[in-house]
Image: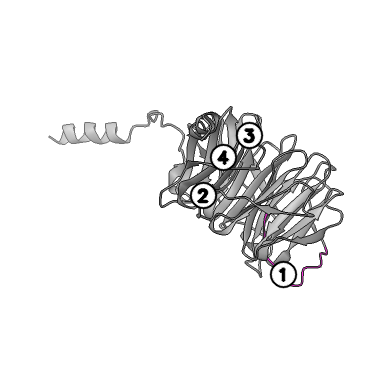
Amino acid sequence: MAMLIGVIAVYAFYPRSLPHFPATETNPTRLRINGIAMIGERLIAVGESGHILISDDTGQHWRDARIGPGAGITRLDATLTQVAAVGGKIALAVGHDGVVLRSDDAGETWTPVRAEAESSDPLFAVCRTSTGTIIAAGSFGRLLRSTDDGASFEPVAVDLPDEPHLNGIACADDGKAMIAGEMAQVLRSRDGGATWDMVQLPYNGSLYGVVQAGPSRWVAFGLLGHVFGTDDFGDSWSEIKTGAETSLFGGLKTADGRVVLLGQGSTVLVSTDGGKSFGIERIGGRDSLVAGIEIAPGRLMLGGEKGISELTLGRTVAALAGGQ
């Protein structure tokens, strides 16, 4: 018996190769996702608790990106609100505590380049203008500008007496940029973000985003399904009735020109006429959608309260083709 116990003990502690375990994956349905971007074939998603997820197989599997120290941050736990590809392999993510993170390897690794330890005021949106200037916008009228591919940012002085939250931004190829904010206030720039002026929509509720729907068409959207369009870069606006009364938080334009708006209750609205009218693709649910990107013709990757999901457009297009 003593010999048997001895043999078992030797076997138990004898060094041997460990079995192979698959790489740990992050479940993207357990995190709130606030922003999605794409660099090449890589998807990047950002959300709560400082998570940055990347996928190299069109969203079938996700893993956490590496986030290093910087800007006084040793461990990132601030909620991230948006991510954008800004040229080449460079991507930027923004979020609470005024944080800006930068990646120059297509999202594999990230470094904080800006943060405000004494303040939790968030940045909500970021984009790159056609002049190369990068604009970040956020709470209480905050506007930041970078001319070095996001390595550093400086504040932009804008006359906003009410200090509205600046919630969403869109940058065009001709140097124009537009920002949607609280109290239906919209900022616009014609010179790549160097100067800005404010316009007031015929409405006083919150706007959460804006999309360039065509060469001269812009669409702003927000609280309780309110959608507005302009064909003269904000000099005049008209309201677009969509039939939906759910708040709209995100928007995108597909490669074939469709405009998609996303919102509360899993709402998806689609326009096939350049943002002049919208049909309901999907509505009804308890979860909100806040971000989306097209990963293949008509195939969308969406982010929201329940993480990442997919949607293939089709029902609205068929209905409009049938004259309904």
**Classed neighbour count for the residue bearing mark 2: other residues with Cα under 10 Å, few (<14), some (14–19), many (≥20):** few
Q: Secondary structure at mark 2?
A: loop
Residue reaching furthest to the left: 1
- For badge 1, the amino acid type reads Glu
**Foreground disc of the pair 3, 1:** 3
Question: Given this view, does label 3 or label 4 mark the residue nearer the observer?
Answer: 4
Q: Quadrant of residue 99?
A: bottom right
Residue beneath label 2, please?
243
Q: Mark 2 against mark 4, which lies toward the viewer?
A: 2
Question: Which mark is in front, 2 or 3?
Answer: 2
Q: Which residue has dot 4 on it?
A: 270
Residues at badges 3 and 1 in contact (C-beta under 8 Å)? no
* Quadrant occupied by the N terminus: top left
Rendered image: mark on residue 254: 3
Q: Which residues make up the magenta segment?
A: 157-168
Residue with the mark numbered 1: 163
Q: Looking at the rendering, which quadrant does residue 163 occupy?
A: bottom right
Q: Residue at x 58, y 31 (%)?
A: 295
Q: Nearer the viewer, residue 171 or 135?
A: 171
Mark 2 and mark 1: span between their CA atoms?
31 Å
Main secondary-structure element of the magenta-colored stretch: loop
Amino acid type, callout 3: Thr
Is residue 217 a member of the stretch shown in magenta?
Answer: no
For the residues labelled 2 and 4, the Cα–Cα distance comes to 12 Å
- For the residues marked 2 and 3, what is the alpha-carbon distance in whole angstroms? 22 Å
The picture places residue 217, in percent across and down from the top left corner, at 73, 43
Between discs 3 and 1, the one toward the N terminus: 1
- Horizontally, residue 232 falls left or right of residue 9, namely right
Colour scheme shown? one colour
* N-terminal label among 2 and 3: 2
